[in-house]
Amino acid sequence: MTNWDVYKQKLLKNPEFKKLYEESQPEFEIAKAIIAARIQNKITQKELAKRMNTTQSVISRVEQARTSPSISFLKRLAAALNTTLRVQFK
């Protein structure tokens, strides 16, 4: 276990922190998927932004989970990455 894992487990014992952590997971999962798809396509944030007709800072905010992307944004993202958008509930 890394130091972060140990620290996270300690934090998750706090019910308030645990609730906030769990509520933020969808945004982080979306961010991870976007980063992975961008890296797989070997393009920069700047290139992805250009393909989507947006700015690099918008891509950065989404990848940092600082904002929640709209469905239309995700559709444009999928088109820019030559892929499809799929929703999966766990």
Image (cartoon, rainbow, N blue to C red):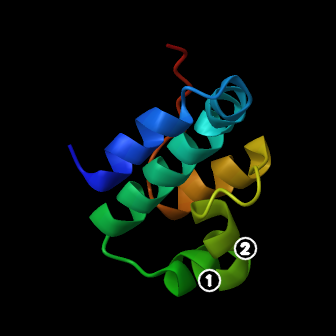
Q: Amino acid at mark 1?
A: Lys
Nearer to the camera, 62 or 83: 62
**89 up-or-down from 30: above or below:** above
Residue occupying image coordinates x 62% and y 78%: 49
Q: Marks 2 and 1: which is nearer the front?
A: 2
Where is residue 25, by image quadrant? top right
* Residue 21: image tag: none
Residue hosting label 2: 58
Q: Up-down: is 50 above or below 39? A: below
Question: Could you tell me residue 13's position as x and y percent?
Answer: 55, 26
Q: Is residue 56 left or right of residue 43?
A: right
In this rendering, the answer to whether 11 lies above or below 46 is above
Residue 30 position in % (x across, y down) = 56, 45
Numbered marks: total: 2
The answer for how far apart the CA atoms under marks 2 and 1 are is 11 Å
Looking at marks 2 and 1 on the same chain, the residue that comes earlier in the sequence is marked by 1
Q: Is residue 19 left or right of residue 42?
A: right
The location of residue 9, given as percent across then percent down, is 43, 34
For label 1, the residue is 50
For the point 77% across and 48% down, the residue is: 72
Callout 1 secondary element: helix
Looking at the picture, tell me which residue is in the foreground, 76 or 23: 23
Q: Residue at 66% of width from left, 49% of height from top? A: 74
The amino acid beneath tag 2 is Val
Q: Quadrant of residue 62?
A: bottom right
Image quarter in which the N terminus is found:
top left
Q: Residue at x 54, y 64 (%)?
A: 80
- Residue 18: image location, x then y, percent: 63, 28
Q: 53 or 18: nearer the eye?
A: 18
